[in-house]
Amino acid sequence: MDHTDPNGTRFEPEVRVYITFQCRGDIYGSQCRSCFATARAKLFKRCPRDKGAIIWYDQCFLEFSSTSTGGKINYDDNICIDTARARPNAKTNTGDDSVLEFLRLFENLTNIAVTKRNNFVKDVEKPALYAAGEKRFGNKKIYVMVQCTHDLTPRACVECVNHNVRQFQDCYEDKPVGLKKGARVLGRSCNFRFERYPFVNAKTSPNYLKF
């Protein structure tokens, strides 16, 4: 489009860009800055002409958009990546039991995320909107994490997590066995993950619990 005023002078229209960046709750300082630099370089290389894009890494995510979405739950830009399928084991709980226990664990973890503040940050009374922990399932441990973006209210955080837990049930559940070995849901507004191995730093994670 040719942007020209009545006097024939060309001008460039104002372009407003909204950027959202957040590191995982256990990542601080130079690690966080390094993740941002990597995400920014990769995003602009892959999407140089796009009006909006989002990229996720293990330790952070970055989004840019031509419209402001702050404070609103993004129900659309969410994906789930599952780990290899679990194998049946007669000595462990049934599939239904393990899934129900997993859902209760995530519910407890989400409630902690929206009520407990970040004990590593001084003079901030707002909830951390992040929590992580571990729990024994049968003869093995499961490691879990949940996080929302800081522009959400605690109530919106709970709604976002609950929505994705329902939306991606087929991604983390391996019927009729129970849970898969691991899965992660990546979203603009919230994300969660569980694995059979530690993937966050328990020492730097606010609200890290052993259930």
Image (cartoon, helix red, strand yellow):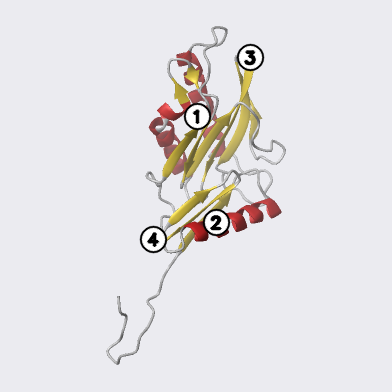
Classify residue 65 as left or right of residue 202: left
Which residue, as the protein is rendered here, is positioned at the far bottom? Answer: 7
Q: Position of residue 72 (x, y in %)?
A: 40, 50
- Residue shown at 44%/40% (left/top)? 79
Kindly report which numbered mark, 4 or 1, lies closer to the viewer in this rendering.
Answer: 4
Q: Residue at x 39, y 79 (%)?
A: 12
Q: How many neighbours does mark 2 have within 10 angstroms: few (below 14), some (14-19), or many (20 or more)?
A: few
Determine the secondary structure under disc 4.
loop
Nearer the observer: mark 3 or 1; the answer is 3
Q: In the structure shown, which secondary structural element does the residue marked by tag 1 occupy?
A: helix
Which sits earlier in the primary sequence, circle 4 or circle 3? Answer: 4
Between the C-alphas of marks 1 and 2, the distance is 34 Å
Spatial CA distance of label 4 from label 1 is 32 Å
Inspect the image, locate mark 4, and give the three-letter code of the amino acid beneath it. Thr
Question: Where residue 67 is drawn, which disc sits there?
Answer: 4
Please indicate whether residue 211 sits to the left or right of residue 159 in the image.
Answer: right
Q: Nearer the viewer, mark 2 or mark 3?
A: 2
Mark 4 in CB contact with mark 3 (< 8 angstroms)? no
Which mark is drawn over residue 139? Answer: 3
**Image location of residue 168, percent across then percent down:** 41, 32
Contact between marks 2 and 4 (CB within 8 A): the answer is: no
Where does residue 71 sit, x and y in percent of width and height?
43, 52
